[in-house]
Image (spheres, rainbow, N blue to C red):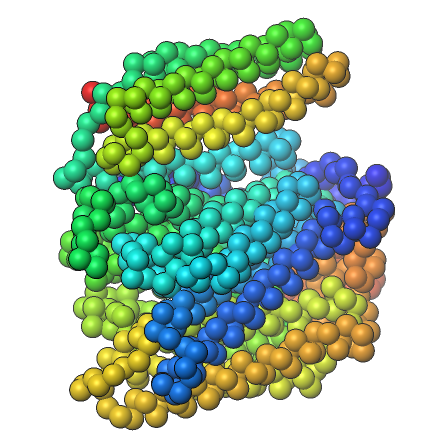
Amino acid sequence: MTYALLFLGGIMAIVVWWLVRQTVNVKPWMEQRPVEIVDGEGALPLPSVKVGLGVFLAVATSLFALLISAYHMRMMGTDWTTLALPRVLWLNTGVLILSSGAMQWTRAAARRGQIDGVRTGLIAAGVFTFSFLAGQLWAWQQLNASGYFVATNPATAFFYLLTALHGLHLLGGLWVWGRTTAKVLRGVEVRKVRLSVELCTVYWHYLLLVWLVLFAVLLHTHT
Amino acid sequence: MTSITHDESAYAPPAEVEEPELYHPKTFVGKYIWSQDAKVIAVQYAITAIAIGLVALVLSGIMRLQLGFPHVFSFITPSSYLQYVTMHGMIMVIYLLTALFLGGFGNYLIPLMVGARDMVFPYVNMVSYWVYLFAVLLLVASFFVPGGPTGAGWTLYPPQAILSGTPGANWGIILMLVSLAFFIIGFTMGGLNYVVTVLQARTRGMTMMRLPLTVWGIFMATILALLAFPALFVSAIMMILDQALGTSFFMPALVSKGQHLDYNGGSPILFQHLFWFFGHPEVYIVALPAFGIVSDLISVNARKNIFGYRMMVWAILAIGGLSFMVWAHHMYVSGMNPYFGFFFATTTLIIAVPTALKVYNWVLTLWRGNIHLTVPMLFAIGFVFTFINGGLTGLFLGNVPVDIPLSGTMFVVAHFHMVMAVSPILVVFGAIYHWYPKVTGRMLNDTMGKFHFWVTFLGTYAIYYPMHYLGFLGVPRRYYAMGTTVFIPESAQTLNEAITIAALIVGAVQVVFLYNLIWSYFNGKPSGPNPWRATTLEWQTPDTPPKHGNFGPTLPVVYRWAYDYSVPGAAEDFIPQNQPPGKKTGGLEKTPTRASLVHKRLPLRASRSHSAA
């Protein structure tokens, strides 16, 4: 549980630090302060949806941190075996990096107001993401073919669980991506999709990071 | 969309959020069923939570019948007894208290108290309720599947939770775990709303330090829940896989009913870690909103500002931070390393410090206050008593050498019912009596309310005080019947009968409360907009009950904190948060002195410590 504790400790420390900073030195019972002094105590200078996404990413981080903790605790069992990870995972990782890059490129296009760039970028990101998911399924298939299904041993069980949960998060992102792409294809203005594109970009980078961490954990503990 | 026309005042900070696009329903269904109005969603949450809570109340009554009068009721079998225990615990903790405090009070109070028109993501908020309802229905469905609901105890410990000897090991446990997973998904949707609304949708002038403590409590509890529920989610998914696909996350190699099972090497302790990593913060998820609400009830009814507002806020933050570091004190008997035990005992005792601070501050707020013993105030004071009692036995159980002999006895049952069942439920009642007039425009009946309070308050002591003694005698919890147990005297059974009678009376009296809710809706005295003469924004709405959008054409501007009661020189003994300074109708001077903020009757010495707080 050390990992989960560290992650959550970190998140809670940020939350508490930020809130204490908001509250220290404030005497609300004698507060009749002019406008300029209270600047910085208001809302964050971000759209609410972005703050919402940030909070959601904290929740998802908690989920994956707990899974990694559980993984390490279960590894100590005597029945733990190491797997030969399917090679295709390297390819998938590359594809996911490409999808994240395409999102970044879309975001830049949206900032410049180029609807063509946004359209191309979104479609490319979608294609790469779906390829990644197909590749993950292929990795499952390979493992399955070599005789390792979910219940074969704890290492495979964790492999399927981690990849499935990561894939489900990506599918959730693809739902927002689908709505945004549909809007773009219907020909709405760039400024109406800019926020969605920015949210998708942040989410894609986040899920890339999660995958890199998960992959590193898997590589570290398997051959 | 209504436009904001704020009046300009040098003393109000700039607007903190732009006007949201509100959803405007036209049909009855859009207004009251598929509603995106946080106030309607709140009532939906509350009604669902109370309904499923009543099921759990009946289950506890059946359990008490078995314990008080064993072998009398043939429909209670050892299996069904365990199922009642499990469902009672899980429903009360998750589906009633968590849902009611955060989904019910959170939805109703956050937008109104921070001066927002609605939650920031109304659609997600609506979906949150329907996912919650679905989770509740799945849970209820488990009563009707083959084998019935799970009887694994509310902690659902493997391996026994999914072994064939445990009731509901096939359908029941799966439905329970799936229901929990849906509950968590639904809660996460709601929780995002509560946190982001507090951060982003506060009205002009509502700085974090001008928030009422109710909002602080719900806000911090939501953060805890968002971070802690994933632990339950992970363990639920892993246990579903163990049960359905035969993985061995938690299941060790074992022999059940003479048969070697296919499981191998799993770790039940891993489940305990994950479960309590959620389970302990859960205690504070329920307690922090209660702390916040009680602070406001006491301040309003003592007509005095809350003692040590900043300290109260910091205590909430400290409790929230610490609550993630004490989980293993539920696992002292799992054979952990003694050094871990020492560590967790220490953190457990440390968390008592901010908690005790809050208790002192409530008592000091009452000190020399102009106390009005209204029904909400009775419940609030009842809470303080009960919470102190339950908290003190928590200090016993937080120490390893005391916990080990008491663990698994009725002492533990008595402790956690005092501290996290009776205490929060007293606050729930107090809060309902307090805010019902805002929700319906009518007061709840006072006589019925007082009767409800006294029977509930005294009755719960009649139930749980003797239970501590049963624990000392070594009476184990979760047992269907004692059989012949040499070390437990006959009198324990007499005590059990008395407890059962008290429990049935307390349970029956809740009908009076429900009747009051319905009767007063039609016949209650009209309350007017602000029956308690309170300062917070929800009482300053132009309509009671507030209409969709809460505040009419203009959002309120906040000029002061939420606790300006009995301010010397003011025309009335409360100054609403949205009243500008220096108004003839009883506002403050432009630059108030410390002394002017202190209650008239306080001597100088008290006023000094008061300001320092």
User: What is the quadrant of residue B87 in the picture?
Assistant: bottom left
Question: In the depicted view, which residue is nearer to us: B307 or B196?
Answer: B196
The mark tally for this picture is: 0
A101 or A185, nearer to the observer: A185
The image quadrant that residue B52 belongs to is: bottom right
Please tell me which residue is depicted at 81% across the width and 45% down the height of the picture: B25
Seen at 65% across and 10% down, the residue is: A119
Q: Does residue B110 appear anywhere in the picture? A: yes
Q: Is residue B226 above or below residue B82?
A: above
Tell me where residue B604 appears, x and y as whole percent.
55, 73
Relative image position of residue B27 (x, y in whole percent):
84, 49
Query: Which residue is at the front of the view, B195 or B185?
Result: B185
Q: Position of residue B18 (x, y in %)?
A: 73, 36
Note whether B348 is above or below A50 in the view shown. Answer: below
Image quadrant in which the N terminus of chain B is located = top right
A108 relative to A59, above or below: above
Residue B59 vertical position relative to residue B200 in the rendered view, above or below? below
Task: Locate residue B527 relative to residue B561 in the image: left or right.
Answer: right
Residue drawn 70% across the image and 82% down it: B446
Residue in view at x 55 percent, y 56 percent: B136
Describe residue B69's horizontal placement relative to residue B485 as left or right: right
Residue B307, visible in the rendered structure: no
Q: Quadrant of residue B409?
A: bottom left
Q: Position of residue B347 (x, y in %)?
A: 29, 57
